[in-house]
Amino acid sequence: MDLHDRVAVVTGASSGIGRQFSRDLINRGATVFGLARRMNKLEAIRETLGDAFHPVTCDVREEDSVTTAFDTVLDAAGQIDVLINNAGLGIFGSVDDYSTEDWDTLMETNVRGVFLCTRAAVPTMKAQNEERGFGGHIVNIASIAGLLGNPNIGAYNASKFGVRGFSKSMMKELRDDGIKVTCVYPGSIETDFFDVAGADMTDHPMKPEDVSSTVLHVVQGPDNYLISEVVMRPLRPRG
């Protein structure tokens, strides 16, 4: 996809790789609607990235919030060519100490949010396929934790395995509608994710710009060329 004059929606755009995705999409000519809960952070990003970045307040866990956010995008731009489902969080802990509240928060953000945003974008992408023969591209940011289990991250594993399963299903369901679905499985990335999760960062994580460059390479492929899954790891995470 040539990203010039395309419209992208990036969830979790207020920090980390979401912010980097937004920057790189704009540098390639796209207009980006950045979704997140914290408008002050989104406004600060707009000051840096300029008018091609449009802040939209959205809590991906809430159906009404997602509906309103995507209505805002369509009212302003009339199309959605790329959706990057990036919003997510980690809450780690042993199963016997893990609270129901933390479980629900994790699942609602990491799995329900991907479902709600995908459902909101698909009708527009299907209509675009009818009009121009290609609907768009949905990229779901999972994690290496969606491929293998580890102690004390069982809830996070479950959420990212859920994103993996949903992505595999959507890839097959939507491909005949001209909609690509790609699931990405990054290892540790140099963001504030581990601080929020209360876990230790690896000594040598990947850089947000490196992860973003790979995702944009996938998005910019020919219309009939689908990379459905990508696994990324730091070469020497412990040095």
Image (tube, grey):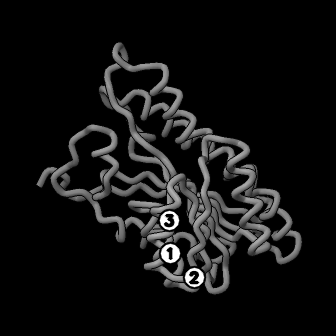
Task: Indicate left or right for 209 with 41 as reference.
Answer: left
**Image position of 212 (left or right of 127):** left
State the residue position of label 1.
Answer: 46
In percent of width and height, residue 23 lies at: 46, 76
Residue position for label 3: 42
Residue in view at x 50 percent, y 75 percent: 46
- Is residue 76 in sight in this rendering? yes
The residue that mark 2 highlights is 51
Mark sitting on residue 112: none
Q: Residues within 10 Å of mark 1 (few under 14, many from 20)?
A: some
| Image point (58%, 59%), residue name | 35
Please report whichever mark, 1 or 2, sits nearer to the chain's N-terminal start.
1
Tell me the SS state at disc 1.
helix
The 10 Å Cα crowd at callout 2, few under 14, some 14 to 19, many 20 or more, is few
Amino acid type at image mark 1: Arg
Residue 218 percent location from the top left of the image: 53, 70
Disc 3 residue type (three-letter):
Leu
Q: Secondary structure at mark 3?
A: helix
Give how far apart the Cα atoms at labels 1 and 3 are.
6 Å
Q: Residue at x 69, y 57 (%)?
A: 69
Q: Give above or below for 185 relative to 32.
A: above
Q: Crowding near pointer 3: few (<14 within 10 Å), some, many (20+)?
A: many
Q: Position of residue 3 (x, y in %)?
A: 61, 81
